Image: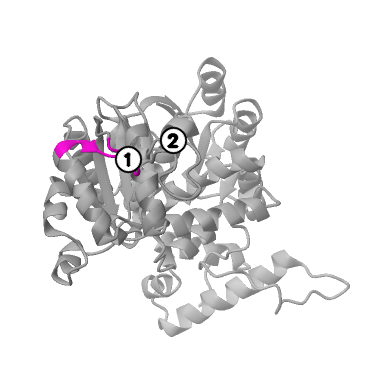
Amino acid sequence: MRALILEDESSLREILSIILSNFNYEIDEAGTLQEGMEKINENDYDLALVDLRLPDGSGMELVRKLKREKPETEVIIITAFASTETVKEAFELGVYDYVEKPFKLEDLKLILRNVTDKIELKKRPVETAIPEIVGRSKPVEKLKETIKKIAPYDVNVLILGESGSGKELVAKAIHHLSPRKNRPFVAINCAALPPELLESELFGYKKGAFTGAVSDKKGLIEKANGGTLFLDEIGDMPLPLQAKLLRFLETRRFIPLGSTEEREVDVRVVAATNKNLKEEIKKGRFREDLYYRLATIVIEVPPLRERKEDIPLLVEFFAREFSKKYGKEIKRISKGFIDYLTGLPLEGNVRELRNIVEREVILSEDGILGSGYSSTGEVKSEKGVEIPEEGVNLKELLAEIEKEYLFKALEMAEGNKTKAAKLLGLTLRELRYRFEKYSPKGGERN
């Protein structure tokens, strides 16, 4: 990956360069608008960090050119001198984010981590990314390492995890990283079929085995020959069928319904459940011997609430998937939408998140995913705001509100500007800048 830093302060360029190098970028630097223009004419960049106030012009010129000629380049604006109109234009152009100086390094690192994930995701076709596990959190990194370690070995695997946490994706990842990857991956949900039908689906049947069996049918076990058989929700398999499955796991042989001929297949079995099988064993609902046959390797999939830092990347992934599916152009994802999702319990895990993103992509009309969510993560109300027929001057209205908060905070802090800044969530420098903006003589009010 390659990044451009356009910043006239050499010390800040050096800091940004060090940070970006930790994300494995090749870095080019420019200190003027002209140098920056020359760089983007000569090279393609995955990411550009752009200061707006430069010695020879505005960084917005470079942003406009990039988004016009090389829209795939992600842009982050870093500046202390952006007007509301400039910020609005930047986001309309598709800028990834805006960081106001002075900034906290940890905040910038989080933004860079998320945009880097997005860039890496764009480099992979959706079709090849689907079987993989999306995320950079510690629980997911640990899960990926476990999958890499066990995938090459032809042993049975039991995947444990809550509903919607991605157990089938883990099973697919195991298959795709195994020597069986070019052979079939066959999945069946043991909870979705009645016992009689589940048995015939698994083991197949001969013509005349039962009413309606008008011809021979191969079972899923036979269809998976040479590949991987994924038994989802194995905890819901009825006890009589568990006994038949156990015999198959021990011998790799089975007899289709209505047949006397024994058949042998070569399959790897991966099972999954959201139930506590040890508790099911105690209650007599699951065979202990079957459990130990299945659980040669046990993998636990973390619920989404334990890896909420992965939500932005998951949203990017699903937004890209559904944008392609429904022919929608999503330029960016609103921060309010991410805040809203992060605040949800998401008991349905990744599946629930995926459904929410799909709905928002379908409903999106302005190219901004989740534009109906405020910066606090709440759904914006369509009521409560009234605009008179003659209209309002929004700039003046917002300025008056800002001034009231500034002077009220200073009053509450008894003139201590550091305390006043803290009350408003500002840095001292930002507070001074705002006071200077509103003071008639360019100074702060006593």
Residue 231, image x, y percentages: 31, 47
Q: In which quarter of the image is the N terminus?
A: top left
Q: Residue furthest right?
A: 390
Q: Nearer the viewer, residue 132 or 266?
A: 266
Does the magenta segment cover residue 307?
Answer: no
Q: How far apart are marks 1 and 2 (CA)?
A: 9 Å
Examine the residues drawn in magenta and state their main secondary structure.
Answer: loop
- Report which residue position mark 1 lands on: 256
| Element type at mark 1 | loop
Q: Where is residue 291 in the image (x, y as percent from the top left)?
A: 15, 54
Say few, some or many: other residues with alpha carbon within 10 Å of mark 1 (under 14 / 14 to 19 / 20 or more).
Answer: many
- Amino acid type of disc 2? Asp
The residue at 17%/69% (across/down) is 284
Q: Going 19% across and 29% down the picture, which residue do you hit? A: 152
- SS category of the residue bearing label 2: loop
Name the residue: 71% across, 77% down: 383
Q: Return the residue nearer the eye: 420 or 377.
A: 377
The magenta stretch is 251-260
Residue identified by numbered label 2: 216
